[in-house]
Image: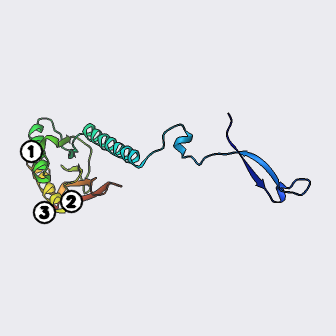
Amino acid sequence: MGQPMVQKRLEGPGFQSLAHRPTLVEIPFRHSQSPEIERGRRPATKQRRRKRAATAGAESQQATSRRKKRRGPRMPCLNVSTNVNLEGVDTSAILAEASKAVANIIGKPEAYVMVVVKGSVPMAFGGTQEPAAYGELVSIGGLNPDVNKKLSAGIASILESKLSVPKSRFYLKFHDSKAYPAQEHAQCLHALHQE
């Protein structure tokens, strides 16, 4: 059996017969069907639509949770470069003190703090190659002007006591990627601890 046929009167300049009378043409009749029926699926009821949306939402939350677990905790990272030769210097004491200072001042667990110290880096500051240091601290949240000032003072004290780098010859640059997700916000501080 074929599809039911419906007679439809076609009129107008393009559908006139030679006798100038309206022509009746048989065309297949189609029920107004939803896209799901046309594709061979049951039509989606409101209840099924809600269930599908809830399932998709739950799957999205699970995927986000899995991504967060894979990335792990967002660790603050302090990277310090200096022109001082580190041979014969107790670098483990510098690393331990700096790690503790960053964790305490930012308020994040020390287990997530990373500290890197590089020595013998060719560096000139103020036109001389006297002992100097440059540092960068990257953190996702936890940074603000007050915290930055405390961090600058704390790290400068450690470098002065352990490496004889004067506080006036030390720069510390801060990157807070949580404050400005679209672009990394950098604040460069020079000897704020001397104020």
Looking at the image, do the residues carrying marks 1 and 2 touch, with CB atoms under 8 Å apart?
no
Viewer-nearest residue: 174 or 69: 69
Q: Residue furthest top?
A: 1
Name the residue tied to disc 3: 194
Name the residue tied to disc 1: 97
Q: Looking at the figure, which quarter contains the N terminus?
A: top right
The answer to which of marks 1 and 2 sits earlier in the sequence is 1
Viewer-nearest residue: 31 or 148: 31
Check disc 3: other Cα within 10 Å, few if <14, some if 14-19, many if 20+.
few
Q: Residue 16: image x %, image y %?
A: 86, 56
Question: What residue is at 16 percent from the left and 56 percent from the top?
Answer: 152
Helix, strand or loop at label 3? It is helix
Q: Looking at the figure, which quarter contains the C terminus?
A: bottom left
Helix, strand or loop at label 2? It is strand
Give the vertical position of 165 relative to 149 (above or below): above
- Mark 2: amino acid: His
Q: Residue furthest right?
A: 19
> Which of the 4 quarters of the picture holds residue 75?
top left
- Mark 1: amino acid: Glu
Q: Residue furthest bottom?
A: 195
Residue 190 - label = 2
Question: What residue is at 64 percent from the left and 45 percent from the top?
Answer: 30
